[in-house]
């Protein structure tokens, strides 16, 4: 199975979201749990979730990948920003557990559920303090009963972002008590901007990932081209084949034996029709 899709919105409900996935031929998708800039989440509707889960199952859609708001920064120097991050993550995880419960109650096989977030920016406090604050947050919100796995996203290393190096993600995971609840999502634009040469040495980058983090911790891929050269630390996504990574390298990513079972989510600058075209293109290149 090739799990390929893009960013979709659940603002109009979960069933409409999965219908949108069907329309563009997606077998995976990622959605914001709330407005990506923060704010309150819409109340969940059990009937909508049940219909959503049935449709998702019927379409053979892979793991559910939720994305935390961009404003979530668990390693901010500002205590009120950290408090917002804790509260948002805790609430989002509860909502995702509820989706799983509804699947269980209705005997619908619930796929794996992931909650992806940007580790955060330490803003002059230093990477070490950042790593500590992020692991403090995870220790504060994770519990042994939950089945959702939280994913640390690999970052471009822009400004004071934590997570631009695999070592930093490893250090966070090492300090988390329930570390089986933590995985990683690899963003192709971000690792490229962070300096990892996925164009000329994908195998080398993946073996470095395996040595430092462990490939078994890798749960999802964000599939993006990058506007900038390797190591630019800019984080500007480009359409597939229109950036510095290029179509051939992206095709090697989707067909790599260590990656091909994972859900691939496009976060390219596109509207729905553009995503549909990229999905069709990548499907034609899948071996
Ligand atoms: Fe992201
Ligand atoms: Fe991403
Ligand atoms: Zn990005």
Image: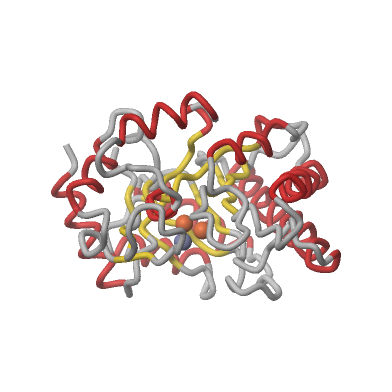
Which coloring applies here?
secondary structure
Above or below residue 259? Residue 227 is: below
Above or below residue 1? Residue 5 is: below
Q: Residue furthest top?
A: 211
Quick check: can you spot residue 55? no
- Residue at 69 percent of width and 49 percent of height: 127
Q: Position of residue 130 (x, y in %)?
A: 73, 50
Within the image, what quadrant is residue 266 found in?
bottom left
Within the image, what quadrant is residue 71 found in?
bottom right
Please name whichever residue, 82 or 106, is drawn nearer the observer in this view of the structure: 82
Q: Quadrant of the N terminus?
A: top left
- Residue at 21 percent of width and 45 percent of height: 251
Please name whichever residue, 192 or 254, is drawn nearer the observer in this view of the structure: 192
Above or below residue 121? Residue 180 is: above
- Residue at 17 percent of width and 47 percent of height: 248
Please name whichever residue, 128 or 108, is drawn nearer the observer in this view of the structure: 128
Q: Position of residue 190 (x, y in %)?
A: 44, 54
Quick check: can you spot residue 251? yes
Query: Is residue 6 rendered to the left or right of residue 180?
Result: left
- Residue at 78 percent of width and 49 percent of height: 133
Q: Position of residue 144 (x, y in %)?
A: 76, 33
Q: Position of residue 109 (x, y in %)?
A: 51, 39
Q: Residue furthest left?
A: 284
- Total marks drawn? 0
Q: Quadrant of the C terminus?
A: top left
Within the image, what quadrant is residue 83 found in?
bottom right
Q: Residue furthest right?
A: 79
């Amino acid at each position: 199975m090739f799990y390929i899709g893009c960013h979709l919105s659940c603002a109009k409900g979960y069933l409409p979201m999965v219908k949108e996935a069907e329309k563009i031929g997606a077998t995976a998708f990622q959605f914001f749990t709330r407005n990506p800039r923060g704010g309150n989440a819409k109340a969940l509707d059990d009937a909508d979730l049940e219909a959503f889960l049935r449709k998702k199952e019927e379409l053979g859609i892979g793991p559910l990948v939720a994305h935390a708001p961009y404003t979530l920064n668990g390693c901010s120097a500002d205590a009120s920003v950290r408090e917002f991050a804790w509260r948002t993550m805790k609430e989002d995880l509860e909502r995702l557990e509820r989706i799983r419960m509804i699947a269980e109650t209705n005997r619908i096989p619930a796929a794996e559920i992931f909650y992806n977030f940007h580790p955060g920016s330490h803003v002059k406090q230093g990477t070490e303090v950042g790593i500590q604050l992020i692991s403090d947050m995870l220790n504060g919100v994770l519990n042994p009963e939950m089945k959702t796995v939280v994913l640390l996203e690999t970052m471009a290393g822009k400004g004071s972002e934590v997570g631009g190096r695999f070592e930093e993600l490893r250090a966070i995971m090492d300090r988390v008590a329930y570390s089986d609840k933590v995985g990683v999502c690899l963003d192709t634009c971000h690792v490229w901007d962070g300096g990892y040469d996925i164009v000329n040495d994908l195998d080398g980058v993946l073996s470095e990932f395996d040595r430092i983090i462990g490939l078994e911790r890798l749960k999802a891929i964000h599939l993006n081209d990058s506007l900038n050269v390797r190591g630019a630390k800019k984080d500007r996504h480009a359409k597939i084949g229109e950036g510095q990574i290029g179509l051939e390298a992206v095709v090697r990513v989707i067909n790599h034996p260590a990656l091909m079972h994972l859900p691939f989510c496009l976060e390219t600058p596109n509207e729905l029709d553009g995503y549909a075209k990229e999905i069709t293109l990548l499907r034609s290149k899948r071996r």
